[in-house]
Amino acid sequence: MTEQLAFEFHDTDLDAIAAASGRVAVFVGSDGKLDPAARRVNRLTKGALARLVEAGEIGKMKAGEVKSLGYPAGMAAKAVDVVCLPRRPSVAEARKAGAALSARQGGSALLLLLGSNNRAAEVVLGCALRAYDFDAHMSKKADARGAVTVMATKSAEVASEAKPLLAKAEGVFFTRDLTNEPANVLTTTEFANRLAALEKIGLKVEVLEEKDLQKLGMGALLSVGHGSISPSKVVVMQWNGGKKGDAPLALVGKGVVFDTGGISLKPAAGMEDMTMDMGGAGVVSGVMKSLALRKAKANVVGLVGIVENMPSDRATRPGDVVTSMKGDTIEVINTDAEGRLVLADVMWYAQERFKPRGMIDLATLTGAIIVGLGHENAGVFSNDDDLCKSFLKAAEAEGEGAWRMPIGEAYNALIKSRVADVSNSGGRPAGSITAAMFLKRFVKDDMPWIHLDIAGVASVKSGTAFSPKGATGWGVLALNRLVADMCEAADEG
């Protein structure tokens, strides 16, 4: 597990600023007004901050941007990072500021002089999210990051506000680690073992093996893993922090640890990226870890179908017909349209066993969603306007791009089969929509449901404001907020 930054929280001590080593961050609004800590830094540096303000440099900066003063006279620090941030910034501005500081930190200690800023905890979260490097398989590790000290007017309150936010960051890191792992390390068995280890933090975890899945009739899921020596599994994670007897929210994730496409083999170019095809299951796992760490007052169950899609003499062939747990028969037109087969059985099982209040599935499901939305937004498909609006509101609040896509009965004509109840692929036209319509067959009529196609946002080729290139952990923050808004707020009411 990639270690999160260590944070310490202290009340503001102006006399300690001069001796602080590493980097010291001061926060100045676009109006140029200096708070007590900034005034002390200005005095120590013989007016350097005031000159920056008088030259109009602060006024030119956007909220969250940083300018650095190297090796300031009068201070032990090797740099003063001047952050443009109002005392009452938006959540996005505060997180951007923290991330920008984290990107400059390196191995140095970092002192954040946050004073009375009302979004201090969000600055801490931004700092934590950006401080991620996946170097588990590097012979030369990245330099260890220095500790971060937060000085604030009411440090105990800031520490209390930051605690649940840092629990969410732990979930994001867990998701990123899982999604970044190569497939020879994160086998189906290793994935299940890592999730079973979450029992240590209070989750109830069950691992269903192939014999269990066969008894349940999960022929669709099992057909995907036929060609692999790695056993297919379903892992069930329960967090029961809400009222006893309340129906849980169900989160379902696609966990294809590697996707060759099966007999419908993918092109060689770019196939190495298919280690991230378990991204949906990674997000579900990260959310469940966050809920447990922050002791969420909600009942949530996370279910992930873990398989490997490989070609072999045992692999499912194009044209084969398989039977789902629901009982619907499926003509496998394309073995590279495998994720929906996994989700179909796990979604049906989730509804049959847990009778959830709502269900959300996540999957790196289609290249078509990348063609439509690029890498800025996940595709959102839903049969329930209220649930969908709640999720979109949560995603927007967390700065995680999401865009609602259409569904409709007319698209079912594209996945009609000649020999079975349904085909697993409708070809290129409306590819992400026909995939959603396939999944909708396995949603009960009265079940509020969202399908999130995260193929474009789970892993990226270039870094973002909050993560380096590779796995992003998209969705962990939005789903945590949805749980808080939908389940915890309701319980408190």
Image (cartoon, helix red, strand yellow):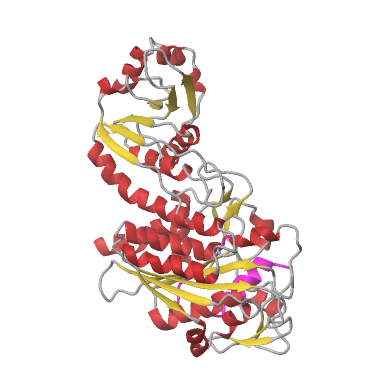
Residue 452 appears at what percent x and percent y? 54, 64
Residue 337 appears at what percent x and percent y? 67, 72
Q: Is residue 310 left or right of residue 248?
A: right
Residue 263 location, quadrant: bottom right
Q: Is residue 99 left or right of residue 413?
A: left
Vertical comparison of 339 with 47: above or below = below
Q: Nearer the viewer, residue 389 or 271?
A: 271
Q: Residue drawn 62% across and 52% down?
A: 375
Vertical comparison of 370 with 87: above or below = below
Q: Residue drawn 68% across and 62% down?
A: 368
Residue 431 within the segment the image draws in magenta: yes
Q: Quadrant of the C terminus?
A: bottom left
> Farthest residue in the front direction?
139
Residue 369 appears at what percent x and percent y? 64, 60
Figure disc tally: 0
**Chain part drawn in magenta:** 429-454
Vertical comparison of 226 with 152: above or below = below
Residue 255 appears at what percent x and percent y? 54, 68
Vertical comparison of 118 with 456: above or below = above
Q: Residue drawn 54% across and 84% down?
A: 218
Please say whether residue 161 is visible from this viewpoint: yes
Q: Quadrant of the N terminus?
A: bottom left
Residue 456 within the segment the image draws in magenta: no
Please say whether residue 252 is visible from this viewpoint: no
